[in-house]
Structures are given as C-alpha cells and as structure tokens.
Amino acid sequence: MSSTNHRLSVHVISFKILREYFDKDPKSKAALVEWHSKTKKANWTNFADMRKTFNSVDNVGNDRFVFNIKGNNYRIVAVVIFKIKKVYIRWVGSHKDYDRLKSINEL
C-alpha cells in the first residue's frame, strides 16, 4: 500500500455569488474567475499558505479574510476554515462599496 499523501484542495462556496456580481459588472469577470480558479486549486493549511497565493490578502479577524482583486478595484470577503479546507464567499464588490461596509464580522 502506498503512503502517498493525498493533497486536498480548497472547496469554494459559492461561485454563484461571483457570477451574480460579474453579471452586473462584466469588467470584473476575468479577475474574479481567476481568483476562483487559484483558490479552488489551493492547499492552504494556514494564513501563511494563503499569502503565498494572494500576497495582498488581509486577515480581518473572526476567520474573515479580505482579498484585493484586480489591483484593488474589487474585493472579496470570505470566511476561511483551514481545518476543513472551505472558503465561504460572504461578499464581493468594488473597493468603493467595501469602504461603505459597516461590519465585516456580520458578513
């Protein structure tokens, strides 16, 4: 029996949120699809691993992370649970809309 270490990639929930956003803002599509593709191929076990994929990601507490997309034109707020390799997209929008958010912890 082989002792091969199976690499489990991250499960992103849900692409639908990204699609709904880029349907309204087609200029964001390529960058959001690229973020999704990189994320679902990732094997993050901690924040340092995530920073290797996205060096501008910020940990804002309560398992929430803010990803700067397309030169910071867009942002994604996601809950990341490293132990079970899940990324729950909680919000996507423009940088301007992000600045208007009241509390990221409630997303």
Image (cartoon, rainbow, N blue to C red):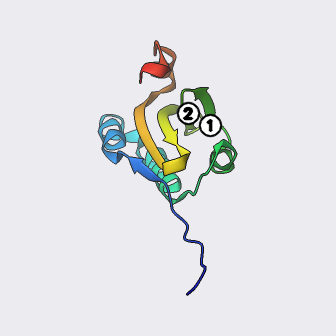
Amino acid of disc 2: Phe
Q: Measuring from the top left, give residue 101's x and y in whole percent.
A: 46, 16
Residue at coordinates 57% horizontally, 35% vertically from top-left?
A: 68
Label 1 packing within 10 angstroms: few (<14), some (14-19), many (20+): some
Q: Secondary structure at mark 2?
A: strand
Residue at coordinates 35% horizontally, 45% vertically from top-left?
A: 14
Which one is nearer the viewer's eye here, 14 or 29?
14
Residue at coordinates 46% horizontally, 44% vertically from top-left?
A: 87
Residue at coordinates 55% horizontally, 56% vertically from top-left?
A: 42
Per the rendering, the mark at residue 57 is 1
Amino acid of disc 1: Val
Q: Earlier in the sequence, mark 1 or mark 2?
A: 1
Q: Are marks 1 and 2 in contact (CB under 8 Å)?
A: yes
Q: Measuring from the top left, give residue 78's x and y in whole percent.
A: 47, 35
Q: Measuring from the top left, give residue 88's x and y in whole percent.
A: 42, 40
Give the answer, above or below, for where 95 lies relative to 20.
above
Q: Measuring from the top left, give residue 32's x and y in whole percent.
A: 45, 45
Q: Is residue 89 left or right of residue 41?
A: left
Per the rendering, the mark at residue 65 is 2
Quarter placement of the N terminus:
bottom right
